[in-house]
C-alpha cells in the first residue's frame, strides 16, 4: 500500500513538473486529462477521491483512538501501538499528499485550459483588428482612388463644358452666317428676277425695233 502511494505521489509530481515546462509530454498530459474529464470520468475521479478521503479519516481516527487508549491508561505506547500509529500516520500523510497533489493537478489543468482559451480569443481579436485595419486601409485607398477619379472627372467635365461653349458659339456663328447667306441668296434671287424682267423687256424692245426696221425697209423697197 505504501509503495503504491509513493508511486502515485511521484507520478503526480512528474505531472506537475510537466505542467511547469512547455514540452511534448505536457501536451500528452493535457490531452489525457481532457479525455478523463469527459463522459463519466469526473464521476469516477470524484468517487476515488472521496474513497481516499474516507480512508484518510479512518487512519486519523485510528491514530486518535490509539493515543486516547494510552492516555486513559497513563502509560507509554507499546512498540506494537507505535508501529500501528506510525503506519496509520504514514498512510494518512501519503494519501493526503496524493489528494493535495491531485487537486493541484486539476487546478493547473483548469488554468492552462483557461489560458489557452484566452490566448486563442486574443489571437482571434488580433486577427479581427488586423482585418479591420486592413479593411480601413483598403477603404482609405478606395476613397483616395475615388477622389482622384472625381478630380479627373471634374477636369474632364470642365473641358467638356468649355468645348460645349465653343461649339455653341460656333453654332450661333453658323446660324448667323446661314441667315446672312439666306438673306443674300434672297437678294440674289430678287436681283435675278429683276434682271430676267429687264432681259425680257430688252428682248421685247429688240423685237419691236426689228419689226419697225423690217417695215421701214419694206416701205423703201416699194
Image: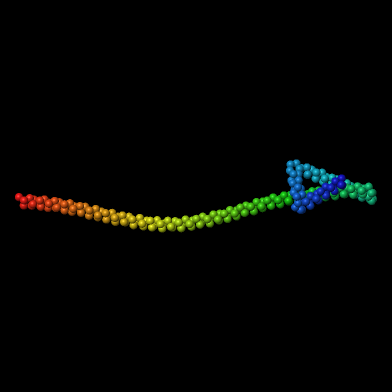
* Residue 131, x across and y down, in percent: 61, 52
Q: Is residue 8 left or right of residue 138?
A: right
For residue 36, what is the image quadrant?
Answer: top right
User: Which residue is pictured at 62% across the width and 52% down the height?
Assistant: 128
Nearer to me, 133 or 214: 214
* Residue 120, x across and y down, in percent: 68, 51
Query: Does residue 104 appear in the picture of this structure?
Result: no
User: Which residue is pictured at 52% across the width and 55% down the height?
Assistant: 145
Residue furthest left as drawn: 222
User: Which residue is pictured at 82% across the width and 45% down the height?
Assistant: 52
Q: Is residue 35 left or right of residue 123?
A: right
Residue furthest top as drawn: 40
Q: How many marks?
A: 0
Quadrant of the image containing the N terminus: top right
Nearer to me, 122 or 156: 156
* Residue 39, x across and y down, in percent: 74, 41
User: Which residue is pictured at 8% across the width and 52% down the height?
Assistant: 217
* Residue 97, x across and y down, in percent: 83, 50
Query: Does residue 10 appear in the picture of this structure?
Result: yes
Q: Is residue 87 left or right of residue 142?
A: right
Give the colouring mode of the picture.
rainbow
Amino acid at each position: 500500500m505504501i509503495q503504491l502511494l509513493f508511486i502515485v505521489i511521484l507520478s503526480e509530481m512528474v505531472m506537475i513538473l510537466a505542467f511547469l515546462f512547455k514540452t511534448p509530454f505536457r501536451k500528452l498530459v493535457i490531452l489525457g486529462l481532457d479525455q478523463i474529464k469527459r463522459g463519466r470520468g469526473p464521476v469516477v475521479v470524484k468517487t476515488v477521491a472521496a474513497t481516499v478521503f474516507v480512508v484518510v479519516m479512518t487512519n486519523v481516527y485510528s491514530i486518535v483512538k490509539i493515543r486516547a487508549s494510552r492516555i486513559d491508561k497513563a502509560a507509554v505506547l507499546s512498540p506494537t501501538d507505535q508501529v500501528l500509529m506510525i503506519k496509520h500516520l504514514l498512510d494518512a500523510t501519503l494519501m493526503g499528499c496524493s489528494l493535495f497533489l491531485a487537486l493541484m493537478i486539476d487546478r493547473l489543468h483548469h488554468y492552462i485550459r483557461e489560458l489557452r482559451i484566452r490566448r486563442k480569443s486574443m489571437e482571434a481579436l488580433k486577427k479581427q483588428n488586423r482585418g479591420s485595419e486592413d479593411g480601413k486601409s483598403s477603404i482609405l485607398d478606395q476613397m483616395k482612388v475615388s477622389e482622384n477619379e472625381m478630380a479627373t472627372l471634374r477636369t474632364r467635365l470642365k473641358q467638356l463644358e468649355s468645348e460645349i461653349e465653343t461649339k455653341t458659339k460656333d453654332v450661333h456663328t453658323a446660324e448667323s452666317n446661314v441667315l446672312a447667306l439666306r438673306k443674300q441668296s434672297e437678294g440674289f434671287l430678287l436681283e435675278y428676277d429683276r434682271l430676267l424682267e429687264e432681259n425680257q423687256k430688252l428682248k421685247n424692245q429688240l423685237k419691236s425695233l426689228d419689226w419697225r426696221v423690217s417695215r421701214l425697209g419694206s416701205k423703201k423697197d416699194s
